[in-house]
Amino acid sequence: MSTTERTPATDPLLVACPHCHAPNRVPAARLSEAPVCGRCGQGLFNGKPVALGVDHFATHVNRGDLPVLVDFWAPWCGPCKMMAPQFERAAAELEPQVRLAKVDTQSEPTLGQQYAIRSIPTLVLFKGGRERARQAGAMAAADIVRWTRQHLPG
Protein backbone atom coordinates (compact mmCIF):
# COMPACT_ATOMS: atom_id res chain seq x y z
CA MET A 1 0.00 0.00 0.00
CA SER A 2 1.34 3.44 -0.84
CA THR A 3 1.70 6.08 1.86
CA THR A 4 -1.04 8.15 0.23
CA GLU A 5 -3.70 5.44 0.45
CA ARG A 6 -6.22 5.91 3.23
CA THR A 7 -7.36 3.16 5.54
CA PRO A 8 -10.05 3.11 8.24
CA ALA A 9 -7.28 3.51 10.85
CA THR A 10 -5.94 6.68 9.20
CA ASP A 11 -9.23 8.17 8.00
CA PRO A 12 -10.00 11.07 10.29
CA LEU A 13 -13.09 10.95 12.47
CA LEU A 14 -15.02 14.09 13.31
CA VAL A 15 -14.99 14.41 17.11
CA ALA A 16 -16.70 17.31 18.89
CA CYS A 17 -14.84 18.82 21.82
CA PRO A 18 -16.67 18.23 25.15
CA HIS A 19 -15.56 21.69 26.33
CA CYS A 20 -16.02 24.15 23.44
CA HIS A 21 -17.95 21.80 21.09
CA ALA A 22 -15.65 22.59 18.14
CA PRO A 23 -15.36 19.80 15.56
CA ASN A 24 -11.93 18.14 15.39
CA ARG A 25 -10.59 15.63 12.88
CA VAL A 26 -8.74 12.77 14.58
CA PRO A 27 -7.42 9.62 12.88
CA ALA A 28 -9.24 6.60 14.33
CA ALA A 29 -5.93 4.96 15.25
CA ARG A 30 -5.00 7.99 17.39
CA LEU A 31 -8.17 8.24 19.48
CA SER A 32 -6.48 6.61 22.46
CA GLU A 33 -3.46 8.95 22.28
CA ALA A 34 -5.09 11.76 24.28
CA PRO A 35 -5.92 14.08 21.36
CA VAL A 36 -6.59 17.74 22.18
CA CYS A 37 -9.00 20.23 20.69
CA GLY A 38 -7.57 22.44 17.97
CA ARG A 39 -9.63 25.40 19.23
CA CYS A 40 -9.43 25.32 23.04
CA GLY A 41 -6.46 22.98 23.57
CA GLN A 42 -8.29 20.80 26.12
CA GLY A 43 -8.49 17.02 25.90
CA LEU A 44 -11.14 15.56 23.61
CA PHE A 45 -11.67 12.73 26.08
CA ASN A 46 -11.73 13.03 29.84
CA GLY A 47 -13.65 9.90 30.82
CA LYS A 48 -16.69 11.90 31.87
CA PRO A 49 -20.08 12.43 30.22
CA VAL A 50 -20.60 15.77 28.48
CA ALA A 51 -23.71 17.78 29.37
CA LEU A 52 -25.59 18.62 26.19
CA GLY A 53 -28.33 21.07 25.46
CA VAL A 54 -30.20 21.88 22.30
CA ASP A 55 -27.38 24.22 21.17
CA HIS A 56 -24.71 21.50 20.90
CA PHE A 57 -26.67 18.25 20.69
CA ALA A 58 -26.50 18.03 16.88
CA THR A 59 -22.77 18.77 16.87
CA HIS A 60 -22.07 15.65 18.91
CA VAL A 61 -24.89 13.32 17.84
CA ASN A 62 -25.67 14.19 14.22
CA ARG A 63 -22.37 15.53 12.90
CA GLY A 64 -19.79 13.63 14.94
CA ASP A 65 -18.48 10.26 13.80
CA LEU A 66 -18.35 8.63 17.23
CA PRO A 67 -21.33 6.73 18.59
CA VAL A 68 -22.98 8.76 21.35
CA LEU A 69 -24.75 7.24 24.34
CA VAL A 70 -27.16 9.80 25.82
CA ASP A 71 -28.61 9.62 29.31
CA PHE A 72 -31.92 11.53 29.34
CA TRP A 73 -32.48 12.40 33.00
CA ALA A 74 -33.89 15.05 35.40
CA PRO A 75 -32.54 16.44 38.68
CA TRP A 76 -35.67 15.45 40.65
CA CYS A 77 -35.50 11.80 39.55
CA GLY A 78 -34.22 9.41 42.25
CA PRO A 79 -33.20 6.59 39.89
CA CYS A 80 -31.42 9.17 37.69
CA LYS A 81 -29.37 10.34 40.68
CA MET A 82 -28.54 6.74 41.58
CA MET A 83 -27.42 5.98 38.02
CA ALA A 84 -25.30 9.14 37.56
CA PRO A 85 -22.08 7.72 39.11
CA GLN A 86 -22.62 4.45 37.21
CA PHE A 87 -22.93 6.37 33.95
CA GLU A 88 -19.72 8.24 34.76
CA ARG A 89 -17.89 4.93 35.40
CA ALA A 90 -19.18 3.65 32.07
CA ALA A 91 -17.84 6.80 30.36
CA ALA A 92 -14.37 6.11 31.73
CA GLU A 93 -14.53 2.60 30.25
CA LEU A 94 -16.19 3.34 26.89
CA GLU A 95 -14.23 6.43 25.84
CA PRO A 96 -12.69 7.09 23.36
CA GLN A 97 -14.71 4.66 21.22
CA VAL A 98 -18.05 6.07 22.43
CA ARG A 99 -18.95 9.58 23.63
CA LEU A 100 -21.26 9.61 26.66
CA ALA A 101 -23.57 12.56 27.14
CA LYS A 102 -26.29 13.68 29.51
CA VAL A 103 -29.42 15.67 28.66
CA ASP A 104 -31.36 17.24 31.52
CA THR A 105 -34.93 16.90 30.26
CA GLN A 106 -36.15 19.49 32.76
CA SER A 107 -33.80 22.15 31.38
CA GLU A 108 -34.01 20.86 27.79
CA PRO A 109 -37.64 19.77 27.30
CA THR A 110 -37.37 20.20 23.52
CA LEU A 111 -34.84 17.36 23.28
CA GLY A 112 -36.94 15.14 25.53
CA GLN A 113 -39.96 15.76 23.32
CA GLN A 114 -38.01 15.38 20.08
CA TYR A 115 -36.80 11.93 21.11
CA ALA A 116 -40.13 10.90 22.72
CA ILE A 117 -38.64 10.35 26.17
CA ARG A 118 -41.53 8.96 28.23
CA SER A 119 -39.65 7.81 31.34
CA ILE A 120 -36.33 8.65 32.91
CA PRO A 121 -33.62 7.69 33.06
CA THR A 122 -33.60 6.59 29.43
CA LEU A 123 -30.43 5.71 27.55
CA VAL A 124 -30.40 6.26 23.80
CA LEU A 125 -27.49 5.08 21.66
CA PHE A 126 -26.89 7.08 18.48
CA LYS A 127 -24.55 6.25 15.61
CA GLY A 128 -24.33 8.45 12.53
CA GLY A 129 -27.14 10.62 13.86
CA ARG A 130 -29.56 7.69 13.99
CA GLU A 131 -30.98 6.00 17.04
CA ARG A 132 -29.59 2.47 17.32
CA ALA A 133 -30.99 1.35 20.67
CA ARG A 134 -32.97 2.59 23.66
CA GLN A 135 -33.24 1.39 27.25
CA ALA A 136 -35.37 2.84 30.06
CA GLY A 137 -34.46 2.45 33.71
CA ALA A 138 -31.37 2.74 35.87
CA MET A 139 -28.45 0.43 35.14
CA ALA A 140 -25.13 -0.42 36.77
CA ALA A 141 -21.90 0.63 35.03
CA ALA A 142 -21.06 -2.90 33.84
CA ASP A 143 -24.57 -3.27 32.40
CA ILE A 144 -24.32 0.08 30.60
CA VAL A 145 -20.98 -0.93 29.06
CA ARG A 146 -22.26 -4.39 28.06
CA TRP A 147 -25.53 -3.00 26.62
CA THR A 148 -23.68 -0.33 24.63
CA ARG A 149 -21.16 -2.76 23.15
CA GLN A 150 -23.93 -5.21 22.33
CA HIS A 151 -25.70 -2.59 20.19
CA LEU A 152 -22.67 -1.33 18.28
CA PRO A 153 -21.52 -3.11 15.15
CA GLY A 154 -18.11 -4.77 15.51
Image: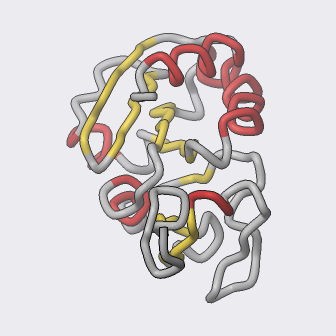
Q: How many marks?
A: 0
With respect to residue 48, does 43 lie above or below?
Answer: below
Q: Position of residue 38 (x, y in %)?
A: 64, 86
Residue 58 found in image quarter: bottom left
Looking at the image, is 12 positioned above or below residue 108?
below
Above or below for 73 versus 134:
below
Which residue is pictured at 65% across the width and 46% down the height?
Answer: 49
Q: Relative to residue 57, is residue 9 drawn left or right?
A: right
In terms of depth relative to the viewer, which is nearer, 74 or 66? 66
Asked whether, in this view, residue 119 is left or right of residue 102, the answer is: left
Which image quadrant for residue 9? bottom right
* Colour scheme employed for the rendering of this structure: secondary structure
Residue at 63% from the left image edge and 16% from the top image edge:
78
In the rendered image, the quadrant that contains the C terminus is top left
**Residue that extends furthest to the front in the rendered view of this protein:** 1
Residue 2: x and y in percent read 49, 75
Q: Nearer the viewer, residue 102 or 38?
A: 38
Q: Is residue 115 left or right of residue 15?
A: left
Residue appearing at x 43%, y 73% in the figure: 5
Q: Tell me the residue at 65%/70% (across/down).
A: 19
139 over 10 or under it: above or below: above
Residue 51 lies, in percent from the top left, at 57, 53
x, y percent for residue 148: 51, 23
